[in-house]
């Protein structure tokens, strides 16, 4: 029953191809759409960043970044009757909450996060904050021990993104003259927890090859031993804020073999070796780019001569933000989130309930929207990562939402996708039924063997939670 083709492709008068059956859901894909000036100029992205800045300025004025206003949770707090302490929840227990201040931050503003498991099984979470990256150990009982931090390279910026490459944290920021820090996490293994260590900037290697030192995000392909800067300012640079490759074969001396400027600004991407049904691309090095108004798929096997395989948008596209392949070992589907459709009130998310778009990518040249999942909790969707059949979605004010997405290969419409748990990190909007704003959680990390889920939040700090079943 796999590979259910929902509809024959039909050619419209414009010569573009769309999928007839999915049109009944109100979403169709559009191949090679015209380039839109409002995206290529950066106007749309600028308006989103401005909306966020104004939210965060308001939050700051209201004291939301004052870490000492938030009570740490240091013992197991089960989710009972929809609450774990002050936090709404379902099927997810709280093990600890650590405010940003207790993770060494002076600004109290958090963003991304990623995890690392040491060779001897210690689980380390790296928490992005406006003033640096905090390192904390997730203990077997779900409590956390702060081990230290790598400060910002230049000025503060809430936009700090982290990925892990082998034993290294790769850290980029929107701060000018920041560059990309490459920190050997094995340095943490000898830290005495009684004396958390603030590392020197010189304890990390630095990739200095960005035009202004700013990058919106970073991506890694561990198998192919490289990282990627995406969304590096300015858009007028030769690399057009596209994919800038960073060779990490020698992590102490990162160099760039080239970039992929073809489709301009890349907001986020997943770069992995292609394993899937499109035989033509088997074994190729592929990047799935989330490019503001399109899903753009690249062949980046030769970093000096990359190509765009396809560039596809969809009705209701507002800001194509991020996504993840359902199964990297059999790349038939991916999930895509649009960050601004709820805010802009367009497409199926116009009522303020976030939409996760399901793409059938069995053909990399003609990916198809096969369906979507609509959350039952009003909010904006942000970063989502898929691990072993579950999608972990950081939906800002609605908190972490865990979806069972294992039904998608047999039912690509998304009708079988179910939310199996949530943990709402932002109680302030509970009484109002949900908020369309850039508050709450930015990202989560879900790949620890212990099953602990780490949630980083903009205002509060780090939550360690776990699914009950
Ligand atoms: C931060 O919050 C604490 C606890 O609520 C309060 O005592 C303190 O005055 C606040 N600090 C600022 C700068 O608002
Ligand atoms: C670049 O790749 C294209 C195929 O995508 C190929 O036709 C061309 O010869 C390559 N150019 C170089 C200089 O390798």
Image (cartoon, rainbow, N blue to C red):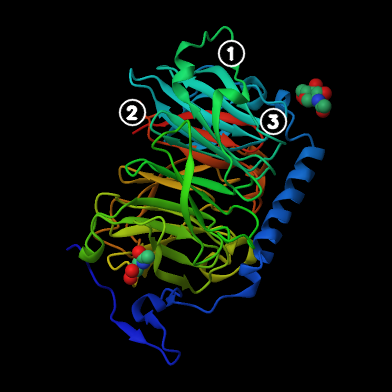
Alpha carbon distance from label 1 to label 3: 18 Å
- Whether tag 1 and tag 2 are in contact, CB under 8 A, the answer is no
Q: Observer-nearest residue: 336 or 296?
A: 296
Mark with earlier residue (3, 2): 3
Label 1: state its secondary structure.
Answer: loop
In the image, residue 291 sits, relative to residue 181, either above or below, namely below
Q: In this view, does 197 lie to the left or right of 363?
A: right
Quarter containing the C terminus = top left
Please identify the quadrant where the N terminus is shown.
Answer: bottom left
Residue 177 % position (x, y): 68, 41
- The residue to which callout 1 is attached is 196
Dot 2, how many residues are within 10 Å of its Cα: few (below 14), some (14-19), or many (20+)? few
Q: Earlier in the sequence, mark 1 or mark 2?
A: 1
Residue 7 lies, with reference to residue 169, above or below; the image says below
The foreground one among 46 and 265 is 265
Res 81 visible? no
Considering the numbered disc 3 on the image, is that residue within a helix, a strand or a loop? loop
Element at label 2: loop
Q: Which residue is drawn at 58% across and 19% down?
A: 148
Residue 197, given in percent of the width and then of the height, sits at 59, 15
Q: Residue 449 carries which label?
A: 2
Residue that protrudes farthest toward the bottom in the picture? 13
Give how far across and how far down residue 430 sits, in percent. Answer: 63, 43
Q: Identify the residue under disc 3.
A: 108
Left or right, 233 with reference to 301: right
Q: Which label's residue is closer to the chain start, 1 or 3?
A: 3
Q: Against 434, is 316 above or below?
A: below
């Amino acid at each position: 029953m796999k590979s259910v083709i929902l509809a024959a492709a039909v050619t419209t008068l414009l010569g573009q191809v769309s999928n007839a059956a999915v049109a009944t859901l109100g979403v169709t894909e559009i191949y090679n759409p015209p380039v839109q000036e409002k995206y290529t100029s950066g106007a749309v992205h600028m308006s989103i960043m401005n909306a966020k800045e104004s939210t965060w300025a308001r939050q700051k004025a209201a004291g939301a970044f004052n870490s000492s206003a938030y009570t740490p949770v240091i013992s197991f707090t089960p989710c009972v009757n929809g609450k774990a302490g002050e936090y709404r929840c379902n099927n997810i227990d709280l093990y600890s909450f650590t405010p940003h201040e207790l993770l060494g931050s002076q600004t109290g503003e958090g963003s991304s996060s990623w995890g690392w498991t040491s060779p001897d099984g210690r689980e380390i979470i790296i928490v992005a904050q406006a003033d640096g990256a905090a390192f904390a150990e997730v203990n077997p009982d779900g409590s956390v021990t702060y081990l230290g931090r790598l400060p910002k390279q230049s000025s503060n910026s809430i936009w700090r993104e982290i990925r892990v490459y082998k034993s290294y944290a790769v850290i980029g920021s929107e701060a000018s003259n920041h560059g990309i820090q490459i920190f050997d996490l094995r340095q943490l293994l000898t830290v005495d927890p009684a004396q958390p260590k603030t590392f020197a900037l010189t304890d990390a290697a630095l990739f200095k090859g960005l035009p202004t030192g700013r990058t919106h995000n970073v991506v890694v392909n561990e198998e192919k031993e490289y990282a990627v800067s995406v969304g590096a300012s300015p858009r007028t640079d030769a690399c057009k804020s596209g994919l800038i490759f960073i060779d990490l074969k020698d992590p102490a001396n990162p160099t760039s073999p080239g970039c992929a400027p073809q489709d301009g600004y890349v907001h986020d991407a997943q770069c992995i070796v292609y394993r899937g049904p499109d035989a033509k691309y088997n074994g190729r090095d592929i990047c799935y780019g989330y490019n503001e108004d399109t899903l753009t798929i690249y062949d980046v096997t030769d970093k000096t001569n990359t190509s765009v395989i396809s560039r596809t948008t969809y009705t209701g596209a507002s800001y194509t933000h991020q996504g993840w392949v359902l199964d990297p070992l059999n790349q038939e589907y991916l999930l895509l989130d649009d960050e601004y459709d709820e805010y802009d009130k367009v497409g199926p998310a116009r009522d303020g309930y976030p939409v996760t778009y399901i793409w059938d990518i069995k053909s990399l040249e003609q990916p198809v929207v096969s369906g979507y999942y609509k959350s039952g909790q009003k909010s904006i969707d942000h970063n989502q990562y898929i691990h072993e059949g579950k999608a972990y979605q950081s939906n800002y004010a609605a908190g972490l939402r865990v979806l069972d997405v294992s039904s998608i290969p047999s039912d690509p419409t998304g009708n079988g996708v179910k939310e199996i748990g949530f943990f709402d990190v932002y109680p302030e909007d509970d009484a109002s039924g949900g908020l369309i704003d850039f508050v709450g959680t930015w990202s989560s990390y879900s790949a620890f063997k212990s099953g602990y889920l780490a949630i980083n939040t903009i205002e509060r700090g780090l939550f360690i939670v776990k699914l009950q079943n």
